[in-house]
Image (cartoon, rainbow, N blue to C red):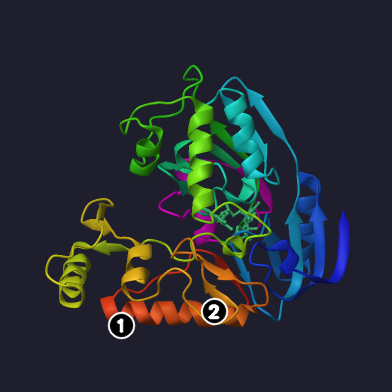
Amino acid sequence: MQELHDAPLAPLTTFRLGGPATRLLTATTDAEVIDAVREADDSATPLLLIGGGSNLVIGDKGFDGTALVIATKGFALDGTRLELAAGEVWTDVVARTVEAGLAGVECLAGIPGSAGATPVQNVGAYGQEVSSTITEVVAYDRTTRETVTLTNEQCAFSYRHSRFKADPARYVVLRVRFALEDAGGLSGPVKYAETARVLGVAPGDRVPLAAARETVLKLRAGKGMVLDPEDHDTWSAGSFFTNPILTDEEFGAFRARVREQCGDGVEPPAYPAGAGRTKTSAAWLIDRAGFTKGYGTGPARISTKHTLALTNRGTATTEDLLALAREVVTGVREVFGVTLVNEPVTVGVDL
Ligand SMILES: Cc1cc2nc3c(=O)[nH]c(=O)nc-3n(C[C@H](O)[C@H](O)[C@H](O)COP(=O)(O)OP(=O)(O)OC[C@H]3O[C@@H](n4cnc5c(N)ncnc54)[C@H](O)[C@@H]3O)c2cc1C
C-alpha cells in the first residue's frame, strides 16, 4: 500500500482544491482497503475515502487524518451480470459495457469518478440512474466490522441520494454488481428529451448503443461536463447544486413568487417527483436570479457553459469557491424563497 505524509489533496480532486492530508494511503486490493479502514477506526483517526475526487470540496486547511484512495481494479462480466471493483474508472466501465453490447449505463457516459462512488449519490444523467441497474453493493461495514452485501432495496436509493450518502461514516463500498440488458446491441429506451431530439428518435425508442453513448458525450462536452484539463469550465464537481424537490405547498408558494418576480406568463420548470412533490430546476433558479453563465470576477466563477457548475479558473482557493456558492444560495433564496443544497460532499468546510 502506498503511504505518503502531509500529502496535497488538491491534485486528487477535479476542482484542484483543498489542503494536504496528514496521511495519504492508496489501496489496490479489497484487503488493503479493509486493513486501512480498520487501522484508522482502531486508532480513532478521521478517515476520508477518495475515489476520483470528482464530487469533493476539500477545505483549504486539508484533512487532519487518513485519506484513503480506493484504487482497486476488477471488471467481471458474466452474461448480462457485471461486478466491478470500487476503484474502476466509471467512464471506462461505460465504454466497455457498450463495446460488450449491453444496455443500462450507456447514458452515464462521461461522468467522472470511480465505480465505487456511483451508488453513493445514485449517479444519474440523461434519463438513467445507477439505481435502475445495481443489484447489490458489497461494502465493509465500519460499525459491525464485517463485509456485507446490500440489496438494491437496502441501498435506499433516491434522487442523488442513498444509504451510503445518508450514513457516510458507516460503509466503504468495495464492489458494485449490476444487471445489464442484452437488447441486441441497442440502448435502453431513450428517456431524455434532448438526447431523443439529437438522435432524431421519439422518447422511448432504442438506438444503437454506441450512438447513445456518443450523443451523450457530445451533449455533455458542450456543457463542460466531460473532464478536460485544458478547459477550466470542467474544473468543477459537475452540478454544484441538486434540483430542489418541493412539497405541493412549497411549490405553490414558489410559483407565486416566480410570477411576482418574473411576470405573470412565466412558469417555473416542474417535474413530478412522487406523490405531492415536484422537482424544479436549480439551473433555472440560478440563471433567473441573475447568476448567468460565466458569472463572477474572481478565480472561482460559474462555468461559461453551464449555470449549475461552479468552477476554479486556475488560482481559486476553496474559500473562493464557497464564497461564490454562498452568494448563489443567498441570491436564489432572496429572489425565489428556495434554498439550494450542494451536491458535492464537503470536507472540513460547510456552505
Ligand atoms: C465534470 C463533471 C461532471 C459530472 N457529472 C455528473 C453527472 O452527470 N451525474 C452525477 O450524478 N454526477 C456527476 N458528477 C459528480 C461525480 O462525478 C459523481 O458523483 C461521481 O460518482 C463521484 O465519483 P468519485 O469517485 O470521483 O467520488 P469522490 O469525489 O472521490 O467521492 C465522493 C463521495 O463518495 C465517497 N466515496 C468515494 N468512494 C467511495 C467508496 N468506495 N465507498 C464509500 N464512499 C466512497 C467519498 O468519501 C465522498 O464522500 C460530475 C462531476 C464532474 C467533475
Specify the amino acid type for callout 2. Leu
Seen in the picture, residue 228 relative to 338 is either above or below; the reply is above
Q: Which residues are the magenta region?
A: 138-167
Is 208 magenta? The answer is no
**For this rendering, which residue is in front, 266 or 90?**
266
| Other residues around mark 2 within 10 Å, as few (<14) / some (14–19) / many (≥20) | some
Q: Determine whether, in the image, residue 218 is placed left or right of residue 256.
A: right
Q: Determine whether, in the image, residue 6 is placed left or right of residue 258.
A: right
**For this rendering, which residue is in front, 65 or 99?**
99
| Other residues around mark 1 within 10 Å, as few (<14) / some (14–19) / many (≥20) | few
Query: Which residue is at 88% across, 57% downward?
Result: 2
**Quadrant where ligand 1 appears:** bottom right
Seen in the picture, residue 263 relative to 202 is either above or below; the reply is below
Proximity of marks 2 and 1: CB atoms separated by less than 8 Å: no
Residue 246 position, x and y percent, is 27, 64
Residue 137 position, x and y percent, is 58, 42
Query: Which residue is at 53% across, 74% downward?
Result: 301
Please report whichever mark, 2 or 1, sits nearer to the chain's N-terminal start.
2
According to the picture, the residue beneath numbered tag 2 turns out to be 322
In three-dimensional space, the C-alpha distance between marks 2 and 1, rounded to whole angstroms, equals 18 Å
Number of marks drawn: 2
Query: Which residue is at 63% across, 43% downward?
Result: 90
Can see residue 133?
yes
According to the picture, the residue beneath numbered tag 1 turns out to be 334
Q: Within the image, what quadrant is residue 190 found in?
A: top left
Secondary-structure class at tag 1: helix
Residue 318 position, x and y percent, is 62, 78
Can see residue 104?
no
**For this rendering, which residue is in front, 305 or 181?**
305
Is 165 magenta? The answer is yes
Specify the amino acid type for callout 1. Glu
Does the numbered disc 1 mark a residue whose Cβ is under 8 Å from ligand 1? no
